[in-house]
Image: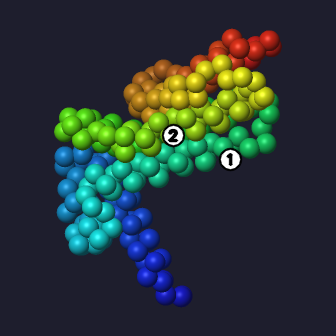
Amino acid sequence: MARLTREQSQALTRERILKAAGDVVARDGYDGASVDRIAEAAGYSKGAFYSNFSSKEDALNQLLESHAGRDVTDLSSMLDGLDDVEAILDAVARWSDARAAELKWGLIAIEFLRRARRDGSLTDRERQPFIAQWRDMGDLLLEKLFPGAAPPIDPVDLGGIVLDLTYGGISVFLEANTAGQMVRQILSAFVAAHTEEPAV
């Protein structure tokens, strides 16, 4: 087995620390997730943590940025080649249900933003990954559901609706519609209200 280069080794260290940060915050909460615990869970020293991240907040911000980008990329792959509205809505619903089942992401995001607002440290750096995620999600859905038409809603608003429903988390615990079912119903009604041939 070939030895990792220094760059590859550092990238692997960062990846493991980021994963551990997410796991520890989801398990222990934001305040309980100390740098010591994160480093220990990743199998590294505190020094290794600080050689890659300036703080716990920096690590969590980078973790959320990375995850936010994957959401749109993964859904885009699922929708690739689909033109039928019903097939598109079904795919979005499946994606939403799969993401909603990963409870930790919504918990991490809410904990991170709530703490930043409480501390008065909530800035554009913390907000921007979420706004960009909403916009990219909205752009993707508008392109698939209304190809060539003027967007009937701001992409940020549409993306925000879908992502908030997906990551809100409460629907997972209720004996009611799943996140995916609710997302599908809203998108279906929205398409029906803005096309000559309503979606079922």
Q: Is residue 41 visible?
A: no
Question: In the image, which is nearer the foreground, mark 2 or mark 1?
Answer: 2
At horizontal 76% and vertical 15% (from top left) the residue drawn is 195
| Image position, residue 101 (x, y; %) | 47, 39
Residue at image point 44% right, 26% down:
171
Tell whether label 1 touches label 2 (CB within 8 Å): no
Of the 4 image quadrants, the one containing the C terminus is top right
The residue depicted at 48 percent of the width and 83 percent of the height is 4
What residue appears at the point 22 percent right and 69 percent down from the top-left corner?
Answer: 46
> Which residue matches tag 1?
77
Which numbered circle lies on residue 180? Answer: none
Foreground residue among 153 and 106? 153
Left or right of 165 on screen, residue 196: right
Circle 1: element type: helix
Where's the N terminus, which quadrant?
Answer: bottom right
**In this rendering, would 160 be left or right of 117?**
right
Q: Nearer the viewer, residue 151 or 197?
A: 151
> How far apart are the alpha carbons under marks 2 and 1?
16 Å
Quarter residue 190 falls in = top right
Provide residue 130's location: percent of width, then percent of height: 45, 39
The amino acid type of the residue labelled 2 equals Gln
Mark 2 highlights which residue? 133
Give the class, few, some or many, for how many residues have Cα within 10 Å of label 2's Cα (few <14, many ≥20): many
